């Protein structure tokens, strides 16, 4: 058996769970529609009642005025006899033939003295208030009290007055509904304008991320009721930014501090007599140096703020990457080739950051492609670059995991720390670009970076960085980039 109030609870639950009623505007609109419906129903009724009351009051005032006029027509004769002289202009108004108005004049004891109807004193009793409506006045004439009653027969109420009331009710009904609907539409516009600052704050909040922790929600036009919440969110963002800053600074400081010991260690290894041990230690040093360099790249990417108007030539960037990483590929009996369009491809972005992203994709492809195969770096006119290898491919379940920091499919491998592809994802996020991976039908994987094309292509070529790029690549003895 349902408990009392269970229906109310289920209604409230469905009201709260409904996606529509999660919107503040729709909640206000729904409640406003209910209010409009109630007003649309009861307002004409109230106006109708007020109009009838006003008409009744005017009618009573008119009846009282008629009674005053009739009182002036009563005259006391010298012998104390009362006479009533009704002028001809008023006789028709009170005639039985017309039947609309009537008057009774009575003394203090209630005896009928004069009446508009020809009835005897015995039969002329006051009629019920349900059938007539009127007014009465009392006058003292030479010591005689008389009461003049004037009434209108409700059965013969003026047709014009009835028409006025009915027409008013009908017209008010038709006018009220459009007015209330216009009011509802106006209120919706007002509500939308009132919460416009919240939408603006939401847009700003959507831009907040690990690379843009400096953004704060605007508080200038936020309603006073919501301002404490926005202020608390901004304060929380301040604390988060402080935590990010400490973490980034620690990473950068640690990476910088490690470079000097590694350089010293590399120098000391050169003094070893055992060539095999020296080569093994050199390989470990190169791996550690690469890890430190990647940590520095991550620290720099985390604090990078791009110029919205900055553009780069994606074709030139990829050409520099291929030139700088070619020795690493050749040292492993592999090859790398630049394919696609030969024309400049202007995109929004920072050329140095783009070079790092493409470099890490190419390096990853060279590591996993088979010997005596070629890694293709293809640049397309739509602002995308595709890097293809002939390796084992990537399992579908791992296609998102590979972009996480320090994630490696095979933990037993010691030739990487799992940071290269995370740098690619970070560069893509900073440039509002996308990065995707899929397996090729003939084997291998294809990574695709897609950037936004610049609206206007620059006429000047991108700066050549061949020698500088090779220096930055810091190729080791085995040809691997540090």
Image (cartoon, rainbow, N blue to C red):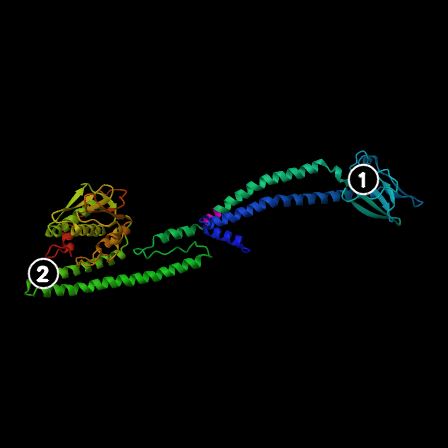
Answer with left or right where residue 161 lies relative to residue 429.
right
The image's mark for residue 102 is 1
Rendered location of residue 55, percent (x, y): 70, 42
Above or below 161: residue 233? below
Which of disc 1 and disc 2 is earlier in sequence? Answer: 1
Magenta span of residues: 189-193
* Location of mark 2 (residue): 279
Quadrant assignment, res 54: top right
Q: Nearer the viewer, mark 2 or mark 1?
A: 2
Q: Is the residue marked by circle 1 packed among few (<14), some (14-19), or many (20+) residues within 10 Å? A: many
* Horizontal and vertical percent position of residue 52: 68, 43
Q: Left or right? Give the position of 367 relative to 245.
A: left
Tell me which secondary structure the magenta stretch mostly adopts. helix
Instruction: Say what secondary structure mark 1 lies in.
Output: strand
121 vs 455, nearest the viewer? 121
Q: How many marks?
A: 2
Whether residue 396 can be seen here = yes
């Amino acid at each position: 058996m349902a408990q009392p109030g269970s229906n109310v609870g289920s209604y409230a639950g469905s009201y709260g769970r409904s996606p529509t009623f999660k919107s503040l505007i729709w909640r206000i609109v729904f409640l406003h529609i209910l209010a409009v419906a109630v007003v649309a129903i009861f307002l004409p009724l109230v106006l109708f009642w007020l109009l009838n009351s006003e008409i009744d009051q005017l009618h009573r005032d008119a009846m009282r005025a008629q009674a005053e006029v009739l009182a002036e027509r009563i005259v006391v004769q010298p012998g104390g006899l009362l006479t009533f002289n009704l002028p001809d202009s008023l006789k028709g108004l009170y005639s039985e033939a017309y039947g609309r108005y009537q008057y009774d004049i009575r003394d203090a004891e209630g005896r009928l003295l004069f009446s508009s109807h020809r009835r005897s004193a015995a039969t002329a009793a006051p009629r019920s208030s349900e059938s007539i409506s009127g007014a009465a006045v009392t006058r003292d004439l030479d010591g005689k009290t008389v009461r003049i009653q004037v009434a209108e027969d409700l059965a013969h109420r003026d047709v014009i007055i009835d028409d006025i009331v009915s027409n008013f009710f009908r017209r008010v009904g038709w006018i009220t509904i459009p007015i209330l609907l216009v009011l509802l539409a106006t209120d919706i516009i007002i509500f939308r304008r009132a919460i416009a600052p919240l939408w603006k704050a939401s847009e700003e909040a959507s831009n907040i991320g690990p690379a843009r922790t400096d953004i704060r929600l605007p508080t200038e036009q936020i309603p006073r009721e919501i301002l404490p919440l926005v202020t608390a969110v901004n304060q929380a963002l301040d604390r988060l930014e402080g935590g990010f800053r400490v973490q980034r600074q620690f990473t950068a400081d640690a990476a910088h501090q490690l470079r000097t010991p590694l350089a010293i260690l590399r120098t000391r290894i050169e003094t070893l007599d055992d060539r095999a041990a020296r080569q093994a230690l050199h390989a470990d040093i190169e791996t550690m140096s690469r890890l430190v360099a990647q940590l520095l790249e991550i620290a720099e990417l985390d604090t990078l703020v791009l110029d919205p108007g900055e553009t780069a030539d994606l074709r030139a960037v990829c050409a520099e990457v291929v030139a700088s990483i070619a020795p690493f590929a050749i040292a492993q009996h592999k090859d790398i080739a630049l394919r696609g369009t030969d024309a400049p491809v202007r995109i929004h972005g920072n050329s140095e950051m783009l070079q790092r992203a493409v470099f890490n994709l190419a390096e990853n492809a060279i590591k996993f492609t088979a010997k005596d195969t070629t890694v293709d770096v293809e640049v397309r006119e739509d602002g995308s670059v595709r890097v293809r290898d002939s390796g084992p491919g990537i399992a579908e379940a791992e296609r998102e995991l590979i972009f996480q920091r320090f994630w490696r499919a095979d933990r037993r491998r010691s030739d990487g720390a799992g940071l290269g592809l995370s740098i690619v994802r970070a560069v893509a996020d900073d440039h509002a670009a996308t990065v995707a991976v899929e397996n090729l039908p003939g084997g291998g994987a294809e990574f695709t970076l897609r950037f936004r094309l610049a609206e206007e292509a620059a006429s000047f070529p991108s700066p050549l960085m061949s020698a500088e790029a090779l220096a930055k690549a810091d190729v080791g003895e085995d040809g691997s980039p540090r």
